[in-house]
Image (cartoon, rainbow, N blue to C red):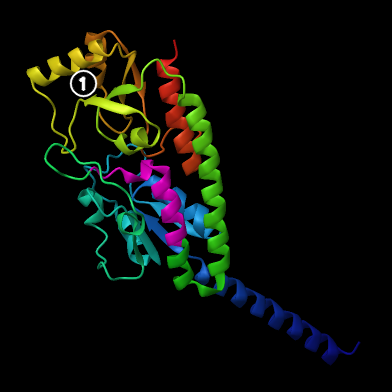
Amino acid sequence: MTHIQRLLGLAAVAVALLASGISAARANDQALRIVATIPPYAMLARAVAGENAEVAAMVQRGHDPHHFDPTVSAMARLRRADAVIRNGIGMRPVEDHIQRTAGDPSLFTVAEAAAFEPIRGPGGETNPHIWLDPDVMAQAAHALADRLGQLRPEAAERFAANANAFGETVTSAEAQCRKWLQELPTRKLVTFHPGFDYFFRHFNLEAVGTYRDLAGNEPGSRGIAELLATIRRHQLPALFREPQLPANAARSLAEEAGVDLAVLDPLGFAEGIDGYPDLLRYNARQVRDAYRP
């Protein structure tokens, strides 16, 4: 091989490597960047968009979406996002930071994409915790696949297949939850906050009292007395709190009632929750174990 041939061969290799680098960079540019307001919607996004998408949740461990201030890095991710997933009802402390108009195709609103029967508080306000209804999330998965397919038409079929697979895993988890919850000593519960009303309704459970209302108001002495009477009247074995909310008041109420204090996690921060089906199973197990004789 002559010196010139060797140089030409090296040049060809360099061109090939450069082209490969450019293709990889373009592929990275095509990766969907998705920001979800809360972790369950980030779980939904990962399931539908697939492992190549960059997905982040605005609300992180230790934070309450009802009282929320984003970090600088969270706002930077939000500005760069190709798609933003929000609840659409009752979560203004988080959603007011999104700064995208309702007609923006990059803004996906679960409350508009899924049909559901609203559960309302005493003042007529809609309970916003719709993501804890598996039917809502299964519908949202297909609607999100359609929306992402509009943003990345070349991957539309893959998104649709992922949504179908997500629905199957949710159905399987739902069946397991029903099995765990079918033989409870009572189907009535008292919670610290009305975060699980959609979950309870779906699995034929009933919240007969909460410490805080939807607006976050705490009861006076009369309200506490009524809660204690409710717990004793229904012979409930436990009171349920949520990990993102202060525990002291719930602990005091449980001690006064003489019942256990258990935990339900609406956001999926507990260890072992990696996806939405895990979130369903975790909370069903928590009820089963707290109520087990």
Mark 1: which amino acid? Answer: Ala
Q: Nearer the viewer, residue 195 or 68?
A: 195
Asked if 210 appears above or below 165 in the picture, the reply is above
- What range is drawn magenta here? 127-144
Q: Is residue 51 visible?
A: no
Q: Nearer the viewer, residue 5 or 182?
A: 182
Residue at image location 22% in from the left, 48% down from the top:
90
Quadrant in the rendering for residue 198: top left
Residue 282 left/right relative to 89: right
- Is residue 287 found inside the magenta-colored segment of the image? no
Residue 167's spot in the image, x, y percent?
Answer: 52, 49
Residue 122 left/right relative to 172: left
Asked if 43 appears above or below 83 in the picture, the reply is above
Q: Is residue 236 visible?
A: yes
Q: Nearer the viewer, residue 186 or 74?
A: 186
Q: Quadrant of the N terminus?
A: bottom right
Secondary structure that dominates the magenta span: helix
Quadrant in the rendering for residue 209: top left
Q: Which residue is mark 1?
A: 249
Asked if 94 appears above or below 278 in the picture, the reply is below
Residue 131's spot in the image, x, y percent?
Answer: 36, 45
Asked if 275 appears above or below 192 in the picture, the reply is below
Q: Residues within 10 Å of mark 1 (few under 14, many from 20)?
A: some
